Amino acid sequence: MTRSVRRTHRIRRTARVAGAGAAALLALSACSSSSDTDSDSAGAPSSSPKLSGQVTVFAAASLKESFTTLGETFEKQHPGTEVTFNFAGSDTLAASITGGAPADVFASASPKTMATVTDAGAAAGTPATFVRNQLEIATLPGNPDHVSSLEDLTGSGLKVVLCDESVPCGAAARKALDASGLELTPVSYEQDVKAALTKVELKEADAAVVYKTDVKAAGDKVTGVDFPESAKAVNDYPITLLKDAPNTDAAMAFIELVKSAEGQRVLTGAGFRTP
C-alpha cells in the first residue's frame, strides 16, 4: 500500500473516532442536562394555584367592620376574587349552614354555635379560635343617665336592650348577670348585637349590653361603660372551612389571612382580643 493511501486511511479513521467521541460527548451532555432538569423539577416547590372566583363568608354580626376590611385586603392580594359576606347572629347563620345554604367559611361568635355546624358534619376539619371579645355597656352619647355598673341597668325607668340568649352576646350577658346575682328585664331582646346597639343609636333605648368592638365601631353615637363582670363572660370566636365549600382554595386562603399577623392587626385594632 502506498504511503499516500495509508495516510488517507489514517485520516478517515481519525475522523470516525473524533466523530464518535463528539457524539458521545453530546449524548453525555444531553443526559446530564436532562438529569439536571429532572433534579431541578423534583426539588422546586410547586407554585400555588392562582385564586379566583367568589368566596362566601358567613360571619357573626360583630365581625362586620373588621371582616369587611379584610375582604377588601384579600381581593387586592388576589385579583380575580370576590369576597361576599352574610353577617347575622351566629345561631341564625349556623341554622342556615346546616339547612344547606351554600357558603365557604363560617366565623362564629361562640364555640357553642360553631358546635351546631360541626355536630352536623358541615365543617371541614377542626375550627380554630382566632379572636376573643368582651362585653361592654353602650349608653346614649355622654351617658346622661350616669350608668357606671351592670347593677345600674336594673334601676327603674331605664330602657335597656339585650341580645336574645340564643345568640352569643345574649348568652354572655346572661352569664355576666348570673355571676353578679342580678336580674334584668329588658324592653326587648334582639337577634344580633348590631340590632341591640342600633336601638341605642336611634335613642329607642337608654342602654344595651353589647361587645366592646361594637361600641368602638359606633364612635360618638354611643358611650361605652366597662363593668367587671364582663371578665367572666368572654367569648371565643372560632372559624372554619365548610365541608361543601364551593371555592375551597380561596376559602382556605381567606382563613389564613384572618389568622395572619396582618389579619390580627385589623381585628385587634377593632377592639378584639387575641386568643
Image (cartoon, rainbow, N blue to C red):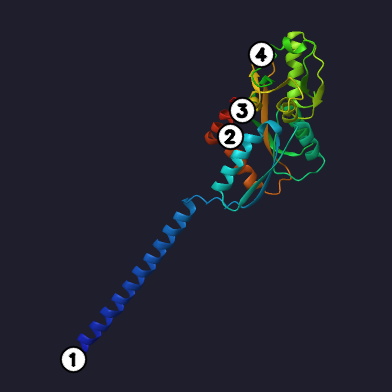
Where's residue 241, x and y in %?
Answer: 68, 40
Give the Cα separation between the discs numbered 1 and 4. 118 Å
Per the image, label 3 sits on a secondary structure element best described as helix
Q: Nearer the viewer, mark 1 or mark 4?
A: 4
Look at mark 4 in the image and give the residue it sits on.
227
Per the image, label 2 sits on a secondary structure element best described as helix
Look at mark 1 in the image and give the residue it sits on.
2
Choose the circle earlier in sequence order: 3 or 4.
3
Residue 52 drawn above or below residue 220: below
Per the image, label 4 sits on a secondary structure element best described as loop
Q: In the orientation shown, which residue stands out farthest toward the bottom?
A: 2
Name the kind of residue labelled 1 in the image: Thr
Residue 268 drawn above or below residue 50: above
Give the Cα separation between the discs numbered 2 and 1. 90 Å
Q: Nearer the viewer, mark 2 or mark 3?
A: 3
Which residue lies at the image location 46% right of the left edge and 58% below the top edge? 38
Residue 14 drawn above or below residue 85: below
Q: Counting other residues with Cα less than 10 Å from the Cα at mark 1, is it few (<14), some (14-19), or many (20 or more)?
A: few
Per the image, label 1 sits on a secondary structure element best described as loop
